[in-house]
Amino acid sequence: MSLVKWLATLVRILLFTFAFTALTMAVGLFCGLLVVVIGAALQGQQPDVAMAYRNVAFPLVKVAVIVSLLGAVGVEVRQARRAPQK
């Protein structure tokens, strides 16, 4: 493969990883905030939203980065192998 194709592949992998990670962060943070607010309301306390970041969103993002990076690399490698050689 030429250098341009390798760079395009690298850019696609990084963009997919960033987009999937950002989406996972948003959904994880929303769910974490929802749980923290509902839990605090049921206990009659003030919600500590920093717990949603520390205990839900960041651990979820760590996993999402690894999964999305490996998934994107796997898809690109499979696609490169199936492409006709010139």
Image: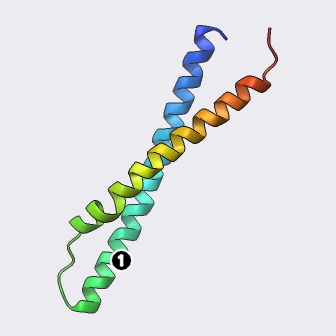
Q: Nearer the viewer, residue 12 or 67?
A: 67
User: Does 81 sit above or below residue 61?
Assistant: above
Label 1 sits on what residue type? Val
The residue positioned 80% from the left and 8% from the top of the image is 86
Circle 1 packing at 10 Å, graded few (<14), some (14-19), many (20+), is: some
Residue tagged 1: 35
Residue at image point 47% right, 52% down: 23
Locate residue 4: give its quadrant: top right
Instruction: Give the answer, above or below, for where 21 lies relative to 77.
Output: below
Q: Is residue 36 above or below residue 56?
A: below
Q: Position of residue 60 (x, y in %)?
A: 41, 57
Q: Which colouring convention does the figure follow?
A: rainbow
9 relative to 29, above or below: above
| Image side of residue 48 versus residue 23, left or right | left
In the rendered image, the quadrant that contains the N terminus is: top right
Residue 50 lies, in percent from the top left, at 22, 65
Q: Secondary structure at mark 1?
A: helix
Residue at the (26%, 61%) spot, across then down: 54
As drawn, the residue found furthest toward the left would be 46
